[in-house]
């Protein structure tokens, strides 16, 4: 982070939060946290909910840069990024293409496979679905999830093939595109990633997630207190370094910028597996990027300013 930047140097900043996705509630909490941090740092900041006001109003308010605290559709899928490019307003995080690829779990996995990065096998589930063929290809259990949704919304662990139709129906409440993924039994980890002013991607300390009965679902992510977060993760340094390197490679392969968070599983013997990468991670009091940043000596306010300092246009010119 450029320590020479003063609060007034950012100009008028808008924090985008809320939005219209199924993750609106979490985005509201993320955005309110980011907004409060900027106010503490005396940044000229305003909260902005795209579900309530058209993005064109950002120009009317002479906004100089945007901190995107939106989650899910219309927030981290490339759509709002494209609109901000057209409005010529610099924004935080990844650009249009990387945001779109990362949001689409199937496309992200295809990119990683083409880069020889380990990720569980998967199938897109199109009608008519042949449950026997799914089980033969992926084995059991399998994970069924919407292709373009976050926060574990619509996720089901299928232990018996008879459970597949109901799992698909649940996932389709969030997205018509549904995937089945080979379920990796083992330990769950996440790795926060931050770029510096030179474009170097830094992997923050690894976090191990220990959820009740292994169910790191929407409730346990944001509203329960039973999930344990072990940071730095209690694994051998070589394993931690390997997962951090995989996360950086996943970030680079997708073409991400600014910041992100990669999720991984490890069965304790074979190579850790990449599950997905989030280009607009949560910034709530339960969120993992602030937790990893604290372990690296970066408090919440400093983290917000570091992300904000790298706001830029990704198409044609920079801020």
Image (cartoon, grey):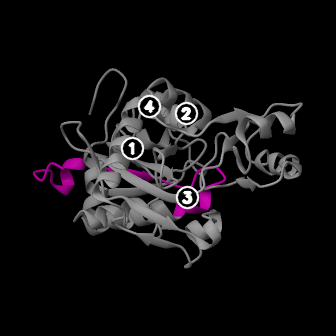
Split into 4 quadrants, where in the image is the C terminus?
top left
Q: Which residue is mark 2?
A: 109
Q: Which residue is mark 1?
A: 247
Vertical comparison of 289 with 50: above or below: below
- First-in-chain label (1 vs 2): 2
Name the secondary structure under disc 4.
Answer: helix
Report if residue 24 lies within the magenta region: yes
Mark 4 vs 1: CB contact within 8 A: no
Q: Separation of disc 3 and disc 4 at Cα? A: 25 Å
Left or right: where 232 falls relative to 6: right
Q: Residue at x 45, y 70 (%)?
A: 229
Q: Which residue is mark 4?
A: 254
- First-in-chain label (4 vs 2): 2
Left or right: where 188 falls relative to 303: right
Residue 87 x/y as whole percent:
43, 31
Q: Where is residue 24, by image quadrant?
A: bottom right
Q: Which residue is mark 3?
A: 186
Q: Nearer the viewer, mark 4 or mark 1?
A: 1
Name the secondary structure under disc 2.
Answer: helix
Q: Residue at x 46, y 53 (%)?
A: 281
- First-in-chain label (4 vs 1): 1
Q: Separation of disc 1 and disc 2 at Cα? A: 13 Å
């Amino acid at each position: 982070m450029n320590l020479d930047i003063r609060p007034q140097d950012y100009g008028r900043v808008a924090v985008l939060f809320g939005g219209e996705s199924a993750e609106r509630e979490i985005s509201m909490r993320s955005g309110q946290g980011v907004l409060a941090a900027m106010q503490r740092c005396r940044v000229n900041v305003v909260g902005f909910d795209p579900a309530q006001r058209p993005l064109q109003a950002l120009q009317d308010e002479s906004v100089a840069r945007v901190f995107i605290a939106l989650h899910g559709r219309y927030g981290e899928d490339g759509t709002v990024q494209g609109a901000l490019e057209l409005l010529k307003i610099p924004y935080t995080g990844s650009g249009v293409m990387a945001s779109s690829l990362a949001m689409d779990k199937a496309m992200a996995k295809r990119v990683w496979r083409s880069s020889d990065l380990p990720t569980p096998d998967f199938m897109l589930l199109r009608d008519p679905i042949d449950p026997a063929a799914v089980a033969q290809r992926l084995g059991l259990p399998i994970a069924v999830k919407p292709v373009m949704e976050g926060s574990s919304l619509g996720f089901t662990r299928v232990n018996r093939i008879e459970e597949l139709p109901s799992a698909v129906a649940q996932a389709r409440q969030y997205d018509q595109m549904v995937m089945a993924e080979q379920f990796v039994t083992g330990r769950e980890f996440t790795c926060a990633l931050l770029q510096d002013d030179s474009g170097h991607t830094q992997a923050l300390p690894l976090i191990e997630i220990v959820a009740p009965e292994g169910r790191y679902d929407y409730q346990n992510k944001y509203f329960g207190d039973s999930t344990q977060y072990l940071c730095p993760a209690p694994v051998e340094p070589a394993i931690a370094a390997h997962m951090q390197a995989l996360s950086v490679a996943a970030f680079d392969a997708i073409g991400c910028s600014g910041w992100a968070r990669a999720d991984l599983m490890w069965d304790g013997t074979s190579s850790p597996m990449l599950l997905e990468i989030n280009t607009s991670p949560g910034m709530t009091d339960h969120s993992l990027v602030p937790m990893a940043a604290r372990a690296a000596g970066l408090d919440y306010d400093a983290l917000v300013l570091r992300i904000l300092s790298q706001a830029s246009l990704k198409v044609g010119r920079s801020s």
